[in-house]
Image (cartoon, rainbow, N blue to C red):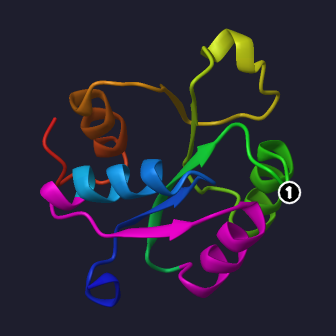
Amino acid sequence: MVEDFPSSVLIIDDDRTIRQAFTEFLAFEGIPVIQARNGAEGISLLRSHLDRIAVVILDFSMPGLSSLQTFSRMREVRADLPILLCSGYSERECDFPGAYNGFLQKPFEISLLFSTVGAYIPRVTQ
């Protein structure tokens, strides 16, 4: 349960299938996931679970708040929060101006997810 584990991952992606896949992959490693459908919901969940979220995986392209707007507002809430950008585009194509902590290009190997998240949640297999 999320309340019992101090290092959860917040997934912000408008695609339910992607959110569910992340949740299942990370559950395999015993990592709780909090899911958000968009940037506004992600920011709200961050505020309500601030002490539980170790890292955020933020989709690059979403309706509503842009990834950059979401990123900026999350940094206002917690400046040291590790935020990983995720996209079907390459990192170069995204041309994201924020100082994000890592990049996952969809599709990716599960081992890359584990090693990237593992940099912020040590119990993840690397």
Q: In which quarter of the image is residue 9?
A: bottom left
Magenta-tinted stretch: 27-50
Asked if the magenta segment contains residue 49, the reply would be yes
Of residues 18 and 116, the one drawn nearer to the viewer in this rendering: 18
Res. 29 visible in picture: no
**Drawn side of residue 16 relative to residue 126, left or right:** right
Q: Quadrant of the C terminus?
A: top left
Of residues 79 and 26, the one drawn nearer to the viewer in this rendering: 26
Of residues 115 and 110, the one drawn nearer to the viewer in this rendering: 110
Q: Residue at x 34, y 41 (%)?
A: 119
Q: Which residue is drawn at 17% across and 55% down?
A: 123
Q: Is residue 125 above or below residue 50?
A: above
Q: Quadrant of the N terminus?
A: bottom left
SS at badge 1: loop
- Residue bearing the label numbered 1: 64
**Drawn side of residue 103 relative to residue 99, left or right:** left
Three-letter amino acid code at the position of disc 1 = Gly
Q: In which quarter of the image is residue 23?
A: bottom left
Q: How many marks?
A: 1
Question: Residue 38, position in %: x, y?
Answer: 70, 61
